[in-house]
Image (cartoon, grey):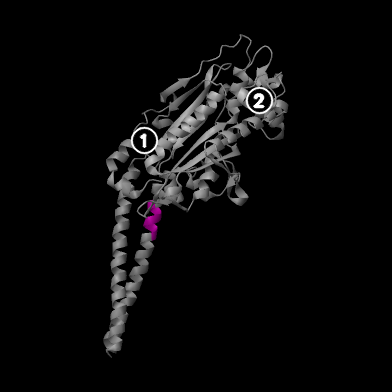
């Protein structure tokens, strides 16, 4: 959530950056400023009336002690009107603050100055490409055919049990999943992240804190009877560990990682591009999360990007890094890098990770602060990234490593899989 003081002091810049994000409800900016003016004016009236009432109460005591009972009783009569005014002004202030809050939560985060303009994924900026695209034989198969051939994943069985988008991993397919999870967690721990195991459902306050609500409720599974949401990513519960917390400045950055299943309705996703593992309703992901000092958060973002790239390099997957344009960014993000791997059988790029800096947008909602060197509290910056999401990693590993003999397992995974080939 943006801070009202920043909006007031930087109106033109706020409008300019919101335009980069293609935000259409720009009138909200002036409405927020006007409501804040009204809030300040009402607060001043309330403070002045309260001060008058307090002064009168003190004066009444003095008059009574001086034996001036009639004057004291006359002043008491006036205090009744002040009490009514105080209640009325208090109710008005609460209503204004609620209206202001409801306007503020509709404003997305401001994009960083490096974010390019654009409306669609095609306008994202390619930062770099790494690795050679493999040349597969003409009879190369996409991962869903390989999964059936080697009895790794049963998509139809998942449809029977639950529905489309809920695959069943079997045999070496299940072992490959577990191997990737353990490998990614081990690499995160080597990079200084502390592993946590978190709930798979969160309450509304947690969804609001990390800006999934009220922006993405249509994409989340909702347990109506208990008013809980299945998590779309481990970012939500891990970041909310620090809700309403004041950290010590010297303890920053706080670094956590965690493996969870993720649940996404993916409403409106149809067509050949979502076949197989390309888009699922349930999938496994390892998330890395940092709470950082505002002065160092962009340095941290680059470190997180390098960590994800290191995983892709170790797996031998060709990849590229994109800086998302304003129109393709998330509601709460200030800057997002997407990492995509090359699917040799499908002949297209598949997104496998997003790494984002939310600056103080989430922490303002979370009331997540730290105490600086001067002893004052200020909002921290939050960052998170996929390190990594498994489905498309599995898809590209199967496709890119297929040979006449079978599918070759990357060397770094062999200690985890306990086998070198899927054949």
Residue 97 is a magenta residue: yes
Q: Badge 1 is on which residue? A: 112
Quarter-of-image position of residue 122:
top left
Query: What secondary structure predominates along the stretch shown in magenta?
Result: helix
Q: Which mark is residue 408?
A: none
Circle 1 — which element? loop
Question: With respect to residue 36, does 158 lie above or below?
Answer: above
Relative to residue 365, is residue 189 drawn left or right?
A: right
- x and y percent of residue 8 in the render? 29, 47
Residue 163 is a magenta residue: no
Q: CA distance from mark 2 to mark 1?
A: 41 Å
Q: Badge 2 is on which residue? A: 414
**What residue is shown at x 35% (from left), y 31% (from top)?**
114
Question: With respect to residue 106, does 114 lie above or below?
Answer: above
- x and y percent of residue 121 in the render? 45, 26
Image quadrant occupied by the C terminus = top right
Q: Which residues are magenta?
A: 94-100
Quarter-of-image position of residue 154:
top right
Q: Nearer the viewer, residue 138 or 92?
A: 138
Q: Is residue 334 visible?
A: no
Q: Nearer the viewer, residue 185 or 123?
A: 185
**What residue is shown at x 51% (from left), y 50% (from top)?**
205
Label 2 packing within 10 angstroms: few (<14), some (14-19), many (20+): some
């Amino acid at each position: 959530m943006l801070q009202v003081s920043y909006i007031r002091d930087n109106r033109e810049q706020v409008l300019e950056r919101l335009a980069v994000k293609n935000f259409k409800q720009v009138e909200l900016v002036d409405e927020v400023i006007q409501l804040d003016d009204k809030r300040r004016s009402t607060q001043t009236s309330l403070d002045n009336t309260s001060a008058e009432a307090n002064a009168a109460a003190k004066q009444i005591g003095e008059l009574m002690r001086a034996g001036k009972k009639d004057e004291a009783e006359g002043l008491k009569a006036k205090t009744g009107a002040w009490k009514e005014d105080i209640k009325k002004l208090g109710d008005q202030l609460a209503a204004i603050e609620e209206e202001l809050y409801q306007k503020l939560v509709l404003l997305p985060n401001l994009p960083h100055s490096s974010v390019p303009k654009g409306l669609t994924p095609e306008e994202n900026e390619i930062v770099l490409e790494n690795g050679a695209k493999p040349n597969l034989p003409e009879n190369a198969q996409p991962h869903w055919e390989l999964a059936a051939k080697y009895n790794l994943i049963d998509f139809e069985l998942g449809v029977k049990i639950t529905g489309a988008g809920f695959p069943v991993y079997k045999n070496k397919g299940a072992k490959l999943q577990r191997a990737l999870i353990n490998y990614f967690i081990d690499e995160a721990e080597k990079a200084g992240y502390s592993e946590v195991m978190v709930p798979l459902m969160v309450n509304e306050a947690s969804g609001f804190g990390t800006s999934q609500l009220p922006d993405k409720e249509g994409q989340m599974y909702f347990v109506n009877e208990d008013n809980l949401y299945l998590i779309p990513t481990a970012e939500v519960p891990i970041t909310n560990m620090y809700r309403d917390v004041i950290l010590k400045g010297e303890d920053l950055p706080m670094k956590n990682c965690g493996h969870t299943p993720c649940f996404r309705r993916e409403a409106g996703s149809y067509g050949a591009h979502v076949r197989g593992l390309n888009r699922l309703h349930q999938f496994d992901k390892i998330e890395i999360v940092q709470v950082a000092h505002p002065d160092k958060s962009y340095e941290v973002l680059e470190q997180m990007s390098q960590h994800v790239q290191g995983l892709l390099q170790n797996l031998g997957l060709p990849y590229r890094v994109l800086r998302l344009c304003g129109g393709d960014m998330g509601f709460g993000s200030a800057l997002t890098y997407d990492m995509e791997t090359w699917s040799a059988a499908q002949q297209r790029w598949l997104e496998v990770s997003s790494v984002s800096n939310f600056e103080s947008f989430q922490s303002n909602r979370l009331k997540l602060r730290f105490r600086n060197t001067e002893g004052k509290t200020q909002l921290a910056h939050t960052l998170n990234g996929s390190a990594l999401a498994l489905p498309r990693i599995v898809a590209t590993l199967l496709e890119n490593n297929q040979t006449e003999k079978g599918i070759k397992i990357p060397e770094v995974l062999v200690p985890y899989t306990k086998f070198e080939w899927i054949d």
